[in-house]
Image: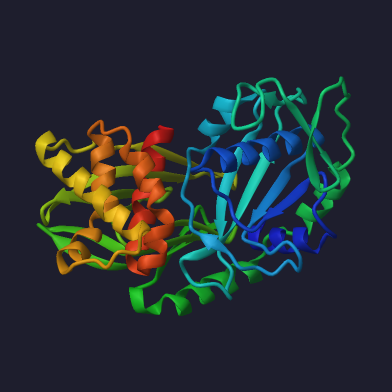
Amino acid sequence: MINKRLLIKNLLAHNDENSFYDKKRKLNISEKEGKAKFLKHICALANSNPKNNSYIVIGVEDEDNQIVGVDFFDDSKIQNLVNAYLSNPPIVSYENIPFPQLPSDIVVGLVTIRPQGGKLCSLRKNIWKYYGGSVFFRDGSISMPKVFDIKIKDVNSEIVSAIESHAQNNIELTLDGVFDFMASRKDYSPAYKVFKEYFVVCWAAREKRKNGEIYYSRVDIELINEHVKLFYSELDEVSISLTDDQFRIVEYVQLGLHDTYNYYPLEEVVITFKDNASYDIESKLLFEPPQFDRKVLYHLYNSNNVLLEKLKNKTPLSKNDEKDIINLPATYLICYFNDFSEAKEKLEEAKPYLKMYDENIYSLYKESIRILRKVRYN
């Protein structure tokens, strides 16, 4: 089993970006340009490495390889995006890798690209300035379009195999990981469980009891063997259940209007550990968007638009405005789920202004975007 933190260190130590490895300061697939560039790199790396894995490391400075990290990104449906836009798509996974020098909510993203069958990968349809049918390859550290026939060559298998073999996990790394997790999360009742005498899962959370049921907030769950953060959330409520071979998480989101809120199940994630030292992660969307009176939503939608204009123009906010702006991200989200199609664009438009206005409100914005992304990909 590969220790993903060690793998990232080995990749960063292996000279610079090349035909099997890329690094990015951040990733933004909520906008067309960022989505198109991400798909271009996936296509190029898959074509340049037909018989071995390729990787993209996210959260690293380009010039000096400094690890700065990015927000936790729990998008289990990223394969849906790849399948929608690429012909002969590779298998793509996104994992969140914690590093001890980073805050608990900041990780390094690791994208793993595994080609299938050695067939040429290409864009299935137009996106941004790239045309359907385009084929990309890596030219050194750059993903370049190719408009002529080219044979797929395997030149990196031995190098990639060596890097991966030097990132294999061991007992010392596992024990160190458990001790580090228990020490760093000691304020939130850390616990661990060993599955199949091999896998170690650590988790920490703040417990809540409602109507005889136990829920958790500030949840942090990590698969220690691979140093992969499986789940992280500061705001939502989560239920956790365990068996001898499964770890089950159900995430709930709080939505409502006029200070009246309910919790709605968002997603169920089941991790099944097997006897052959492997595991599967299956996610199922449970979300049914709440429906509200349209007259009320029209009023709130227009009020949000006025607030957004005030932020753009740097107009001082009244006390009522300061109260209403806390709910702006969630209100736009509810409007979108109730068929206000432009509410999504308004929410994305608000990003830089909310980020500049208040850090806590920007966290609420990111939470709304995360929910939106999960629902849209499904």
* Above or below: residue 116 compared with residue 237: above
In the image, what residue occupies the spot 59% across and 74% down?
176
Residue 137 in the image: x percent, y percent? 80, 34
Given residues 77 and 269, the one toward you in this image is 77
Image x and y of residue 203, in percent: 41, 64
Residue 368 position, x and y percent, is 34, 50
Which residue does the image show at 82% across and 57% down from the upper left?
16
Horizontally, is 47 left or right of 364 in the view?
right
87 sits to left or right of 361: right
Quick one: quadrant of the C terminus? top left
Residue 293 in the figure: left or right of residue 172: left
Q: Quadrant of residue 163?
A: bottom right
Residue 87 in the image: above or below residue 294: above
The image's colouring method is rainbow
Total number of numbered discs in the rendering: 0
Classify 70 as above or below 124. Answer: below
Q: Residue 143, located in which quarter of the rendered image?
A: top right
Point out residue 116 in the picture as x, y percentages from the top left corner. 70, 28
Q: Quadrant of residue 64?
A: bottom right
At horizontal 41% and vertical 66% (from top left) the residue drawn is 356
Query: Is residue 248 in view from this perspective?
Result: no
Question: Looking at the image, can residue 309 be seen?
Answer: yes
**Front one among 347 and 371:** 347
Q: Would you say 355 lies left or right of 256 here? A: right
